[in-house]
Image (cartoon, grey):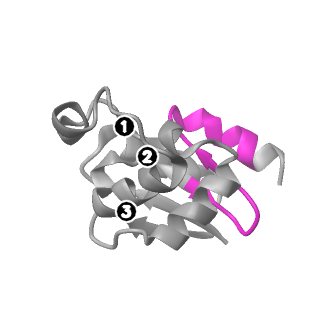
């Protein structure tokens, strides 16, 4: 079973969800703006993605521009910031038991499927 962290108001996230659904019927959709990820969940997700937490931050968000731009944070601080401000999390993210991928553009998910 795959899980996709999705924002239904985001065009890129909708495209990613459509792409994933074209590849598999076994997908759980999580609207992470209405059900924010905890710090622990984000830590696991970042580990599965194989990236630094700062790489998961959407720098074009207004909150980032007004409050975070130009400031330095450690990995744990970035995770806490994203947990408190889920709009900052890049999307969509596709996750399985052992790994995850940011499916933007949607065909990035091919790496996920090809390496199951």
Rendered residue at 43%/72% (across/down)? 38
Q: Which mark is residue 91?
A: 2
Rendering coords of residue 70 (x, y %): 31, 26
User: Closer to the N terminus: mark 2 or mark 1?
Assistant: 1
Please say whether residue 28 is visible from this viewpoint.
no
**For numbered disc 2, what is the local secondary structure?**
loop
- Against 91, residue 85 (above or below) is below
Choose between 63 and 91: the one closer to the eye.
Answer: 63
Residue that mark 1 sits on:
58
Rendering coords of residue 67 (x, y %): 20, 39
- Against 88, residue 65 (above or below) is above
Residue that mark 3 sits on:
83
Please report the bounds of the magenta region as a residue range.
94-112
User: In the image, is 21 to the left or to the right of 84?
Assistant: right
User: Closer to the N terminus: mark 3 or mark 1?
Assistant: 1
- Please tell me whether mark 3 or mark 2 is closer to you in this view: 3
């Amino acid at each position: 079973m795959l899980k996709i962290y999705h924002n239904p108001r985001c065009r890129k996230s909708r495209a990613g969800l459509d792409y994933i659904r074209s590849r598999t019927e076994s997908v759980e959709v999580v609207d992470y703006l209405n059900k924010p990820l905890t710090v622990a969940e984000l830590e696991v997700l970042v580990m599965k993605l194989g990236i630094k937490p700062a790489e998961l931050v959407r720098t074009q968000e207004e909150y980032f521009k007004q409050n975070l731009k130009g400031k330095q944070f450690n990995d744990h601080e970035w995770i806490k910031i994203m947990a408190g401000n889920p709009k900052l999390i890049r999307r969509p993210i596709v996750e399985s038991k052992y790994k995850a991928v940011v499916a933007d553009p949607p065909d990035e998910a091919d790496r996920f499927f090809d390496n199951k």
